[in-house]
Image: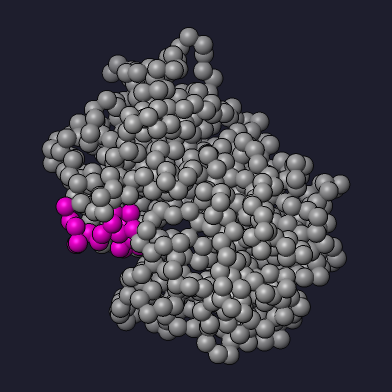
Amino acid sequence: MRPEDVYDLTGVADPRVSPDGSLVAFVVWRLDREANEQRSTLWVVRADGSDPPRQVTFGESRDADPRWSPDGRWLAFTSKRDGDTMQLFVMPVGEPGEPRKLTDHDEDVEQPAWSPDGTRIAFASRVRDPAYEEEDEKKRRPRRITRLRYRLDTEGWVADRPRHLFVVPVEGAEPPRQVTHGDAEDERPSWSPDGTRIAFASARHEDWDVTPINDVYTVAADGSGDPELLTGMDGWCSAPSWSPDGGLIAYLFTPGVFDEPRHGQVAVVDVASGERRLLTSSLDRNCAPYPELREPVWEPGGEGVLFALEDRGTVPLYRVAADGSSAPEQVLAGDFCVTGFDAAGAAVAHVRSAVTSLPELWVGERRLTSVGGPFAETCELVDAEPFTATSADGAEVQAWIARPAGSVEGERYPLVLNVHGGPFTQYGRRFFDEFQVEAGAGYAVVFSNPRGSSGYTEEWGRAIRGPADGGPGWGSLDYEDVMAVVDTALERFDFLDPDRVAVMGGSYGGYMTSWIVGHTDRFRCAISERGVSDMAALDLSSDWAGFLKGYMGAYSWEDPEAYRRVSPIAHAARITTPLLILHSEDDLRCPAGQADALFTVLRSLKREVELVRFPKESHELSRSGSPAHRVMRFQVVLEWLDRHLKPQPEV
């Protein structure tokens, strides 16, 4: 795979099974080189695979969020087909008819959900302050900020445009009615079976901006009355899903406040009593994968729910009884990652991705699409071989190595160590353009899940908490783990050149890269992307300012020495490894000042360092940035690696 092949990436997403289980609607996305945007259309296929998939929307921009009406005759979806914002449409399925537009909002319409009787659709959308009516920003009145979380990465300003819930009649006889209001972020509507109330996730307690708690609320579907709190204000609740009989709501729940990381659980709450039951504690795995796939899916009879979890680099599907009478049981697993799923009737549909295959639609073990086939035929995609490294204290670390594309027996190749973000995420058995491009350029690629990662026991994920609360903190056991992975790879694989090794990573992986080269000079070069250099500054300036207390054990102003000790900037004067620093100018998760600070130290010391900043991009550049910038980023990365790890022609 070459950088320019990014333009040919495609895949399937968001499968939705019709109520009778006979059909599956899904999204096919692709990257438009000329428009420099992602495009998507909706498709439908028979769940038994008896007919080939057929395209049902033909918008020139983006169609998404397919949702079946309760009778299976209509699809609701969101689209940018006639403007710059996503609007809500409905269209007939299986009979003639054009899509009909139901909304005309200033902001994107998201998360559509049909009422049980099929007459209304709830959705979420941001609500702009009247100040936005002044289009000239030089004349617009200033913002008055009284809370944190006033800006969010990829969203921009949210203090004056909160997300709320709306309900619109399908017949279009009335405009959408706003049913939630106030100073809050509301999302993920789910209808009660009788159609009278809507459950949703929100933070509405007095100090919601400084205490990271999220709860499930319900509100009257007609907007009358205030939202009612249903859960216990003792953790993070998201993605509610009402049971078929109306007695329970299933949701994803991460327990604890300022106590990261904890395993996400599947929980149910009794609507009448508020009693909560955790269904997945026995698994000791994170049942709320990041990014969030969707809400728990109820079985038609309401006896159990379907959910996904992270397990040693894979994402399988599980089922658990809603009454907690039996242990969770595996429904679908393999050497792949599930990236979307749904169930209705007798059909369980899912989208899966493997190391050498783009996301495709499956029902059970039957593959129903092959949208990534042409891409795979044009690129030599490289699989990854698993191995285990033993860290300094004896801990076993799961790792993988991908050989260079077209590698030849007997030759030695440079090695690139990749460190994932998070830290509570996992590298896994899914297609990842990063590794394919690096392997395609002639590099062996090593990646692993050191302590701090998800996908293993909760103890493994929490091993690097601190140091303000006595734990070792970032840059401790995780550092030892990734260094052990490098050592093991060099000992085990004789095609690796030990004199040509690089390290790179993004976000927390950027932190680790900067930390590593501040503590060893064994790498020929390094690339730190959207990383953290000053932990205290991040704790005060991120869109999630204050969140580091959950890892560190204290706020930055309560224990500045603890933050300094684990900050790469405190060790930057020791960096002699040539370092490339990549950052996005609109990154609000790790603001660009983090890159500037590290660059300032190294340039002042006259070390070999370069800073590359991408305009109009967020923290998500490498995953969902503009296609042109994603290609440019790969070109910059490979030029840096080639410069330091490959013989250069004489001038």
Q: Is residue 388 magenta?
A: no
| Closer to the camera in the image, 558 or 203 | 558
| Closer to the camera in the image, 478 or 268 | 268
Q: Which residues are magenta?
A: 544-561
Q: Residue visible at 39% across and 40% down?
A: 451
In the image, residue 328 lies at what x, y percent? 64, 52
Q: Residue visible at 36% across and 45% down?
A: 463
Residue 172 figure quarter: bottom right
| Main secondary structure found in the magenta portion | loop
Residue 546, compared with residue 338, is above or below; it is below
In the image, residue 526 lies at what x, y percent? 31, 33
The colour scheme used here is one colour
In the image, residue 461 lies at what x, y percent? 42, 46
- Is residue 293 left or right of 322 when viewed as pictured? left
Most extreme residue toward the top, as rendered? 410
In the image, residue 435 lies at what x, y percent? 48, 34
